[in-house]
Image: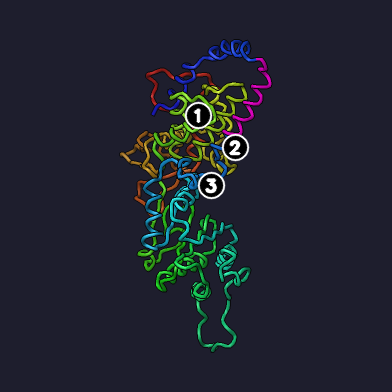
Amino acid sequence: MRLLQSLSNFLARVPDREFQMAAPERAATDPHPASARHSGHIRARQRLAEIFTPTQPLSRKNFYPQEGRCGEAFVGRNAERDRIIRALVEERAHVVIYGERGRGKTSLANLALAHADTAVFDVARYICSADSDFDAITRGLLQDLPRWSSGSRWFGTPPPAGPDPHDDATTPPPSRAVQLGDILAQVEFRRGSRLLFVVDEFDRVVDENTRTAMADMIKQCSDRGMPLSFMIIGVSDSVEQLLGRHPSIQRCVARIALPLLSHAEVELIVARGEEAGLDLPKPARSCIAQLARGVPYMAQLLALRAGQAALDDGRTRIRGDDLIAAVRAAAAEADPRIRTLYNTATGLERDAAALGVLRAAALGPQDEFGRFRVDICGSFLRVAGAQVDPAAWRRVIASGAIRAVRGGEPDLYTFGEAMMPHFVLQRAVLSRQTAGTTPSRGDAPM
């Protein structure tokens, strides 16, 4: 991949004077140039912010189900969407959606619910926090039940946490999952309807007992044939990381892993900026897609910031300097943890060998889940196909910037933070711009 060369070629292809020459002609034909441009500028920015929403997932209202246009705001994930709907509607199974940050897990869940026959489901949701335990989760779900259902009597009432004082002291108390199952068995729903409990950001739960209780609850629902399905959503490499190793629930859970989007799919996301009146040349869409590396969050962020930069300059056509402004903004908005990890791994970019390791991993070939291979060839070490300094590799591993894939093959690695490779690429682009260098056609990849 010649990412920096592609960006440099785009910068050279669209000269500034093209727009400087066009401005006087617009002014001569516009009787109210300042007010008209200002009004159009505001409308375009508002529409741009409606199209690109990197800070929040797409909600069901974004999918226009009432107009028969469900899913137009969503790109890709057709196979995953269909698998979720089949699991819920036909198989009456539970669903676990997992993957790295920024992949669109919550948006996918909302898309699947919008596509499904929602009249069949009564949906209750809960978003986990670090201090969420099983009682807090179930209390929140019960409180979110439709108000008309007989479950309203349980609003604000958690399942009993201890044994009944009238029971024989020698009898062990039932598990919290069994107790919740008893409560749900008494809840009456609409004739023919099913209940769907959506538990989002489950990876934030740190209490192992809560994870075990959730797995037990899923098994209880299946064993008792209850009209209830769970949809668990979280950042993870596997279902086992979220729910633990429970062989008894394997048969009743549909595993939905979210891979990276293809380059073409990311370009489709970026092209939606044209709905706001932007002119996005093919090289601009391609550059953003290369920088996004299959992550929809990053594609939206870069497209939004590039569009804002152009509109701030009174233009609708995206130029290379708009992309540079977008990269600079994305780097500035990066999670402080990522910046700290990057600085630690590279010694504030003074460790050139370690910097080379990160760049090799960020730019090299990866599989559909963003993982890359590390090969030992005698005294040489190759990271994603590029030869690196073995000592620098060990320093990077020690910093936590790169880690082995948990439960994966021994030579399979990934970044310690999902957005780290994007920050590495952003810093590389900005460093190249600061140095004022333009790679020649024969330059090797960074």
Task: State whether residue 436 is above or below residue 91.
Answer: above
Whether residue 417 is visible to the viewer of this picture, yes or no, is no
**As drawn, is 300 to the left or to the right of 406?**
right
Q: Residue at x 40, y 51 (%)?
A: 257
Q: Amino acid at mark 2?
A: Glu
Q: Nearer the viewer, mark 2 or mark 1?
A: 1
Residue 43 among those drawn in magenta = yes
**Residue at far left of view:** 378
- The correct choice, above or below, for 74 with respect to 128 in the image is above
Rendering quarter of residue 391: top left
Amino acid bearing label 3: Lys
Q: Residues within 10 Å of mark 2 (few under 14, many from 20)?
A: few
Which residue carries the number 1 mark?
274
Which one is earlier in the sequence, the residue at label 1 or at label 3? 3
Tell me the distance, in whole angstroms, between the alpha carbons under discs 2 and 1: 25 Å
Q: Which residues are drawn in magenta?
A: 31-47
The residue that disc 2 covers is 333
- Residue 265, compared with residue 131, is above or below; it is above
Q: Secondary structure at mark 2?
A: loop
Q: Nearer the viewer, residue 235 or 267?
A: 267
- Identify the amino acid type marked 1: Glu
Q: Quadrant of the C terminus?
A: top left
Queried whether the magenta region covers residue 303, the answer comes back as no
Which residue matches tag 3? 61
**Closer-to-camera residue (269/147):** 147
Dot 3, crowdedness within 10 Å: few (<14), some or many (≥20)? few
Q: Classify the position of the N terminus by image quarter.
A: top left
Upstream in the sequence, badge 3 or badge 2?
3
Residue 262, image x and y in percent?
A: 39, 38
Instruction: Tell me residue 247's x, y (percent).
Output: 37, 66
Q: Does residue 186 lie above or below 435 as drawn?
A: below
Magenta residues, dominant SS class? helix
